[in-house]
Image (spheres, helix red, strand yellow):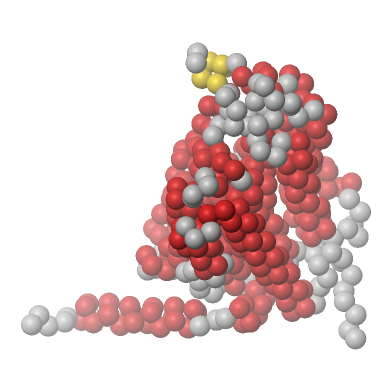
Amino acid sequence: MQKRGPVRLAYLSHARLHREQERRLHRDTLYARPARLREYKYSAVDSNPISLYVMHPFWNTVVKIFPKWLAPNLITFSGFLLLVFNFFLMAYFDPDFYASAPDQKHVPNKVWVIVGLLNFAAYTLDGVDGKQARRTQSSSPLGELFDHGLDSWACMFFVVTVYSTFGRGSNGVSVFILYLLLWMVLFSFILSHWEKYNTGILFLPWGYDISQVTISTVYIVTSIIGVEAWYNPFLFHFLYKDLFVAMIIGCALIVTIPMSLNNYYKAYAKGTLKHHSFYEAMLPFFSPVLLFTLCTFWIFQSPTDILETQPRLFYFMVGTAFANISCQLIVSQMSSTRCQPVNWLLLPLALVILVVMSGLVPEQETNLLYLITIVIALAHIHYGVNVVRQLSKHFNIRIFSLQKPSSD
């Protein structure tokens, strides 16, 4: 047997010490996280030229309009509600994503104006809330968690809303392609928080600013030229819907993923990674990949072709489950605690899929989708409210007010 030399023994000693440090770190529970959050310091890098040279100067001007008594979290929540309003407004005028088809009654042009202005307003409020926090000296881990937690849910709302500009008619995009595009956006979002989970720094993705400016412009242009203009090819035989698909895929594959891997490699080269084992580093991806696998399996094995019959509801369910996974990751990376491998909401989802696959109640598949969507939505809201209340109590601050709570 080969004897262990001093170098080998030193390596094993270092490895055991590192494993023990990780075990102590991971023993933290949700109830210990507020104490760790008190030590948390926000660290972010924004290198997007659109954001740096266009949007930030604009936001610096806009924030001066708001009174200093206005809580940043109220600004954050107001912007999120505008996206929710857009989602349900478009659901009313285009419930099944057929309104933009040539032979269908189109969404009124004035609705596109409203949606475009509200989308840009929501984007502006999302950019202003942090500046208001610094302006009023009210920055806190709760504010960051509140902001990024709502952003994780907002991904679904703005992607599904913009789908109505093309829809799934003869000149549109299929509901399955939109499902994949939605996952491209969701993956891009969680990738940035995976970076922070491992590096301690949030590298703001370029795709977000590019997409928000583009989407707002598309809405306004649609109100002027009508959806019929999107039927025509813009270059040779390439339609505008192809450009829409290419932009989302391109942002993810050409911009987001390479930049994330580069940021991770730089931290690795500097020796500043927070998690050194491959397993611990990749934990944040376990639940999203499992969610994607379960939902995709449901789509392909559905006895009633559930994505074709209930696309909007299915997207909402996926986006809400993803938001809960993301929120728990954000709490973990802000509190330097371990990301849980499997989100518990995936268990009832798997159970519903198992019942659907059994073929015992094929006529109830839509009702089961409604049921699991309600369960996931209520569970996510319950989780968010509890975490926010817990942190507001711990930091002795109010969620939507700059006034300190009474000491009674």
In the picture, measured across the screen, residue 274 lies left or right of residue 387, that is: left
Give above or below for 390 relative to 269.
Answer: below
- The residue under the point 78% across, 46% down is 85
Percent x, y of residue 354: 47, 63
Give the answer, above or below, for where 179 lies relative to 45: above
Q: How many marks?
A: 0
In the rendering, at what x and y percent does residue 398 appear? 83, 70
Looking at the image, which residue sits at the far bottom? 408
**Residue furthest toward the left?**
1
Q: Quadrant of the C terminus?
A: bottom right
| Front position in the image: 90 or 223 | 90
What residue lies at 33% left-to-right and 79% top-to-bottom? 14
Identified at 84% across, 60% down, the residue is 71
User: Which residue is more in the foreground, 382 or 386?
Assistant: 382
Does the rendering let one see residue 192?
A: no
Q: Residue 379, percent across and down?
A: 66, 68
Q: Nearer the viewer, residue 252 or 341?
A: 341
Q: Quadrant of residue 327?
A: bottom right
Q: Answer above or below: position of 298 versus 102.
A: below
Q: Taking 12 as reference, is 79 above or below it?
A: above
Give left or right: position of 186 versus 390: left
